[in-house]
Image (cartoon, coloured by chain):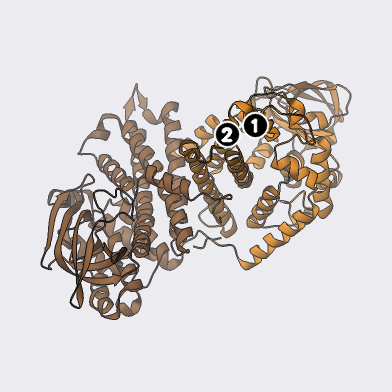
Amino acid sequence: MDLSFTPEEQKFREEIRAWVKENLPQDISHKVHNALELTRDDLQRWAKILGKKGWLGYGWPKEFGGPGWTAVEKHLFEEEAALAGAPRIIPFGPVMVAPVIMAYGNPEQQKRFLPGIASGEVWWSQGYSEPGSGSDLASVKTKAERQGDKYIVNGQKTWTTLGQYGDWMFNLVRTSNEGKPQTGISFLLLDMKSKGVTVRPIKLLDGGHEVNEVFFDNVEVPAENLIGEENKGWTYAKHLLSHERTNIADVNRAKRELERLKRLAKSEGVWEDARFRDEIAKLEVDVVALEMLVLRVLSAATSGKNSLDIAGLLKIKGSEIQQRYSELMMLAGGPYSLPLIREAMEAGWQGNFPGGHPQLAPLTSTYFNMRKTTIYGGSNEVQRNIVAQTVLG
Amino acid sequence: MDFNFSDDQQQLRDAVAKWVEKGYGFERRRGIEAAGGFSREAWDELAELGLGGLYIPEDEGGLGMGPVEGMVVMEELGRGIVLEPLAQSFIAGALLAGHADADTKDNWLPRIAGGQALVVLAYQERKARYRLDVCDAKAQKAGDGFTLHATKSLVPAGDEADAFLVPAQLDGKIALFLVERAADGVAARGYGTQDGSRAAEVVFDGATATLVTRDGLAALEHGVDIGIASTCAEAVGVMDQTLAATVEYMNTRKQFGVAIATFQALRHRVADMKMQVELARSMSYYASLKLNAPAAERRQAMARAKYQLGVSMRFVGQQSVQLHGGIGVTDEYIGSHYFRRLTQLEMIFGDSMHHLGEVSARMQDTAGVFA
C-alpha cells in the first residue's frame, strides 16, 4: 500500500504540467476558470493543439497513434489539464467512437476515421437518445433499412450535445425487430452533411444552446459505414461503457471548481459564516473521498488485482458533487446571482453588473445547467439499479 | 499508487480473520458483554497472535509494523465486533516507543506486546467533549517524580487496565504521564457502554506518576490520531458485515409473496449503503496512509476521514435496521449489535459534527488527497 506516485509518474506529471502551461491559450483558461462561455472555436482550438501533440486521443494505444499511457498517466494528464483550466475534451470522437472503431471497425474504417478524430479536425456527435428512448436505450426506433449497398435511415435522435457543430455522427439504429430489443440494433456512422439530416436546437433552462434534435428523412448512408456486423451494435455500445472509466467521476474538475467556490465564498463574505463554510467543508470531504475512490480504481487497473466494479458509484457521486458545487456557488452569490445578463457571461464584457461583481453572472445558469449530470449517461436511478444488482443479485 | 496488500499483510489478515471466525463467535461475545464487556482471556488470545506489539519495535518485543498492518487487523476485529480495545495497545505502544525514557520503555513495551500489560489512554474530561486541548488535570513535582490530580471518563476497560496514559497540566502546559492502576490514590469505577464494551471513570488523587513527555498535547494528538485511523478501519469491518447481513436478509425475507430484495425502493437504499461503505473504505485507507505524515497534514486527514466514516456509519447502521424491519431492533439479532457498535464508533475520538468543524477550520485554498 502506497499513496504516493512513483518518481517516474511524478516526472510525467511535471512534464504534462509544463507542456500545458506552455500551450494552453490564456484566453481559454481564463474563460474556464471563470465559467465564461466557450465558443466552438475555443473548444476546437484546444482540441487541435492537443491533436498536433498526439494527445487528443490521450487514451489511445500506440498502434493507433496514441501515447499508450497507463491508467495512472491518463489520470495525471486529466488532472493537470483540468487544474490548469483546460476545457474538457469533447468526448464523442476521441473517447467514445474511436475505441469502438479500433475494436470493431475494419482497417479501412480505421484508416478513414481515426486520423480526423486524433487531429481534432472532424467534430463528432452522438446519436443515442431518442424521444422515446432515454434510460431505456435499447428501445431505439430510428430505422436503418438496407437497400443494396446503402442504408436508408429514418427517425429522430435527441439531446445531441453540440450537434450544431457536428461533422459526423455515430448512431444506434434499428435494423431488425426480431428477438429482444438489444439484438436488432446496429452501430452506424453518418455524415451529418448528408441530404435529409436536419439539426434543430433545443433551448435549455439556462438559456444556452447545448443540445439538439436531429431528424433523419430518408438519409442515404453507404453500407461501408456500418461498424462490425449488423444487429451487433448493442454489444459495441456496451463495450464503450464497460471500460473502467474513472473520468466519468470528473474528480479533477471538481477539485478546480472547489477552489473557485472558496474564492467566491471569500469575495462574497460567506467564508467566515460557519453555516456556509461547513457546507464547503462537507464538499471538500466528498471530493477527497471521490478522489480516493478513483485512485483505488486506478490502482486496481494498473495492478490487475482487486478489480473494482464501481463505475456506477463514480457516476453517482461525481455528478452529485458537480451539482453541489454549482449550487453552493450560486448560493455564495446570494441575491446577486439573480440578474440574467447574458453578455456578462462572455469574456471581455465591460458593462456594469448589479452590485459590481460580474464573476457572479454565470453562477445560476451553471447551476441550472448542471441538473443534467444526474440525468445523462444513464440516470443516477439507473446507476443505482446497476449497483444494487451487483450487491443484491 | 498502490492499494494492494502485500503477502505478509494478507497473511496477517487471514490469521486475525481465522481467530475472529473460530474464536470470537456471537455467543462468546454475548457472554463477554454479560460478564462486563472485557475478557482477559480473549485479550491474551489477541496477544498470542502478537497483535499487542504491532506498533512496538522488534527490539522491544513487538512486531515493528505500522498503520497499514494496524488497519488490516482492525478491519477484521470490526467484522467480529470484538469488544477488547486492541487499538489502545497500538496507541500506548507508539506513544511510549516514541517519547518515553529507556527505563520506561524496557519496563512496559515488552509487556504491552506480550499482552501482560493493558495500558490505555485516560484523557476524556467532562468539559472537554472532543477537544484535546481542554485539560483540568494537574500534575505536581514530588521528589524525583510527580503526583497527579485528575478525573478522567470513558477510559476503555479502565478497571481492568494495568496502567494509564494521562495528559495533565504541568508548568502551564499539557504533559503526558504514565500512572499504574495499582498506585495509591487511583480509583477506577467500571461500567458498560452502549456497544457492550467496558469503560471506567478513573479518579487520580495524588497518584504517583511517571513523566512520558512534556510535549503532551502533541503526543496526545498523535495517540488520538492512531485511535481515529484504527476506528475508521474497525468501522469498515463492521459496515461490511452490516451490509452483508442486510443483503442476506433481503434475499431471504418474503413479503407480498416475493423476496423483499426485489423492491426497487429497497434496492436503491442498498445501492446508497454500498456507496457509503466504499467511500468509508476509501477514507479509511486515506487515514492509515496519512498517519505518518507531518502533524498538521495528519490532523487534517484524520478529521476528513473521521467525518466521512461518521456519516457512513450512521447511514449504514440506520438503513440496515430499517431494511430488516422488526427483527432489526431485537437484541437477539446480531444486526442490532452491529448498529450499537457503529453508533459508538462514531462518537469516540470525535463525532461527525466535531470533525466537520475541524475540516472547516483547516480548509486551504486547494484541496485533494495530496493537498
The residue labelled by disc 2 is: A332
Q: Is residue B248 visible?
A: no
User: Are dots 1 and 2 on a single chain?
Assistant: yes
How many C-alpha atoms fall within 10 Å of the one at disc 2: few (<14), some, or many (≥20)?
A: many
Q: Is A234 rendered above or below residue B133?
A: above
The residue sitting at 15% across, 50% down in the picture is B191
**Amino acid type, callout 1:** Leu
User: The chain shown in brown is which?
Assistant: B
Name the foreground residue: A275 vs B269: A275
Q: Residue at x 36, y 40 (%)?
A: B314
Give the label on residue A121, or none: none
Name the chain letter of the residue that bears numbered label 1: A
Chain that is coloured orange in the picture = A
Q: Secondary structure at mark 2?
A: helix
B62 to B288, vertically: above or below: below
In the rendered structure, the answer to whether residue A12 lies left or right of residue B55 reads right
Give the position of the C terminus of chain A as an image quadrant: top left
Pick the residue in front: B368 or B289: B368
Residue at numbered disc 1: A363
Position in image of residue A300 (x %, y %): 55, 55
- Which comes before the other along the chain, label 1 or label 2? 2
